[in-house]
Image: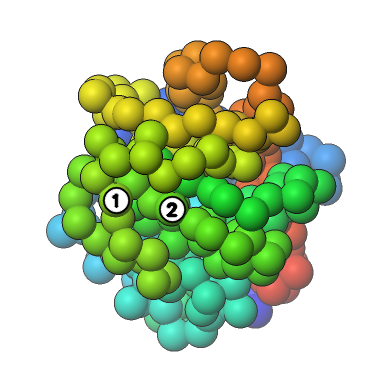
Amino acid sequence: MLLRPGFKLGLIGRHIQYSMSPLLHHSFMRVARKNHSYELFDIEPEAVDDFLKHDGCYNVTTPYKETVFPYCHTLTDEASLCGVVNTIIVHNGHVTGHNTDMLAVYDLLKPYPLNNIMIFGNGGVVKGVVPALKQLGVQTIHMIGRTPKTIHGIETIPFKYAPDIGAMDLCINTIPLTSWTNVSLPSLTSNGVLFDCCYGTSGGFFDQFKGDYHRIKGIEMLIIQASYAFNFWNTHVENF
């Protein structure tokens, strides 16, 4: 696949001015001696269809990870398992979808023995988290949220029932700190792990739990998933 002059490279989302993705990808490009400009494409929902007609390499974030999935003609194994994409390549109208969130979650949690897990939230990010947990052999996954939804066979439990489930080996946050109102917390095992997928709110999520638990910050997930995305483009796009 040959990149044409004027191809686009960047992040598709809504209200994404805060994103650190340009900083990360420009750093990757300096190391790889690439000369591309990574941009933020803050687009309205009705503009997604037209935007995906432009050749380019894109990361996809909230609220479009699920929106873009049906546009994909080809999917990587990870994207197929997740049912949602966060990284795509568009070439001559053909869209190839990938999910690097799954790869990042797998890498970050691989060192820990985990059997009983709770996920806060049930949005598009969770679709990339659950397959990674299943590949790690996790036995029990709970998901709590405000709206009824089933993701990968896991039914949402209302927030108020969280303490009744028992002690968790791991709690994963996928919702912004502004949504943390009237959230009841479960207990953690002595070797419990806290993992915040929202890199802008890690401190606030961790502060909800009192104890000496291992903490995985959202910025760690962001860096790893971004590196997988960059490698995906570099591997699949000629002269990237």
Q: Is residue 108 left or right of residue 147?
A: right
Judge whether 53 appears above or below 29 on screen: below
Tell which of 170 and 73 is nearer to you. Answer: 170
Q: What's the residue at 69%, 73% (across, down)? A: 236
Residue 30 visible in the picture: yes
Q: Is tag 2's residue or tag 1's residue first in the polypeptide sequence?
A: 2
- Residue 94 falls in image quadrant: bottom left
Judge whether 110 appears above or below 240 on screen: above
Residue 92 % position (x, y): 46, 80
Distance between mark 2 and mark 1 Cα atoms: 8 Å
- Considering every residue shown, the one lying at the far left of the view is 46
Residue 118 % position (x, y): 48, 46
- The colour style of the image is rainbow
Other-residue count near label 1 (Cα within 10 Å), few / some / many at <14 / 14–19 / ≥20: many
Contact (CB < 8 A) between labels 2 and 1? yes
The amino acid on which the numbered mark 1 sits, given as a three-letter code, is Ile
Residue 9 visible in the picture: no
Q: Which residue is mark 2?
A: 142
Judge whether 165 appears above or below 59 on screen: above
The amino acid on which the numbered mark 2 sits, given as a three-letter code, is His
Q: What's the residue at 25%, 68% (across, down)? A: 49
Judge whether 94 appears above or below 6 on screen: below
Q: Which residue is mark 1?
A: 157
Q: Is residue 231 left or right of residue 32?
A: left
Residue 90 % position (x, y): 48, 71
Tell which of 23 and 111 is nearer to you. Answer: 111
Q: Secondary structure at mark 2?
A: strand
Tell which of 235 and 115 is nearer to you. Answer: 115
Q: What's the residue at 75%, 50% (across, down)? A: 113
